[in-house]
Image: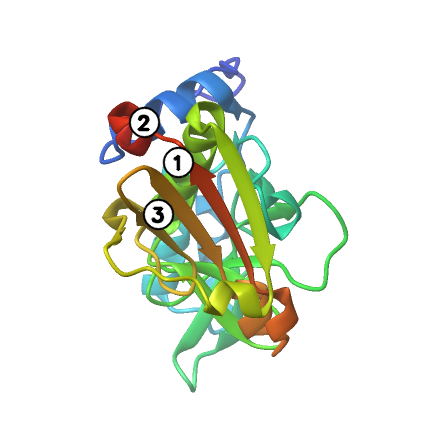
Amino acid sequence: MTAGEPVSPIPVAPAGLTRRARHFVEADGIRVPRQDIRHHRDAWIEHGITAAEFDRAVAFQDRWGGLALPPAPFYEGGPHVLGVEYPRGSAAEEHWSFSAGTCRVSMGHGFRIGLDGSFGIDANHWVPLHADVDGWVESLALASHAGYWAENVRKIKGTAVDALDLDGYEQVPEVQGVTDTWWRGEDKLIAVYRGTAVGFDAPHCLRAHIYEGLDEWGLHGG
């Protein structure tokens, strides 16, 4: 795309997503102009950011920058628009992270991409939620899908989350869960949100959403 060329508000889903997530991105997402950070390369490197880290930020921006998705069911909706901001970290410790996008509301944490590419929150300490941004987007798509098709949705919190019996459930692989996970049973999907509880050492912040009464399409949907 050349400078000054109009940006289509209809996004094209990146390769590698499930059919369900591709439909979610393209049907429910909006694309806005994204910043081209390539011209900042020399300035970033002068401030101690490695070339590899800069290239990682460019790759994220090329794949996800400028994409606005519907609110997540937790974390006050997640990032408003995905996009890179200046990294922070330490060259000496070889630990860098950069912003995954702007928050929708004022919160005690932001959303960041870790050195290993994981998507997470920077609460009292760093908490990876999903192994990469694709997993986060897959989780949003699954929540949207399950919420539409479920006969009932229950929300539980605190100690009730730890008491969930997940025997017989399989972990949903496409969300690439680290701290947050999704589980698929005979007629249920269960989303477990542990990030806030772990990040702030606050067990009462544990949350789980249970989507009940799902048929085969409801359980998978692509």
Q: Earlier in the sequence, mark 1 or mark 3?
A: 3
Depth check, front residue: 176 or 218 = 218
- Residue at 50% in and 51% down: 40
Q: Is residue 108 left or right of residue 171?
A: right
Q: Quadrant of the C terminus?
A: top left
Residue 148: % across, % down: 48, 24
Number of residue marks: 3
- Reading the chain from its start, which is encountered first: label 2 or label 3? 2
Label 1: few (<14), some or many (≥20) within 10 Å? many
**Badge 1 element:** helix
> Residue under circle 1?
142
The amino acid pointed to by label 3 is Gly
**On screen, 29 above or below 192?**
above
Q: Which mark is residue 135?
A: 3
Residue 82 appears anywhere in the view: no
Residue 117 numbered tag: none
Task: Compare residues 170 and 122 and report the one nearer the observer.
Answer: 170
**Looking at numbered disc 1 in the image, what kind of residue is underneath it?**
Leu
Residue depicted at 35% across the width and 47% down the height: 135
| Dot 2 or dot 1, earlier in sequence | 2
* Residue 185 seen anywhere in this rendered image of the structure: yes
Q: Are marks 2 and 1 in contact (CB under 8 Å)?
A: yes
The residue carrying mark 2 is 20
The crowding category of the residue bearing disc 2, from other C-alpha atoms within 10 Å (few below 14, some 14 to 19, many at least 20), is some
Q: Position of residue 119 (x, y in %)?
A: 43, 57
Horizontal and vertical percent for residue 150?
A: 44, 29
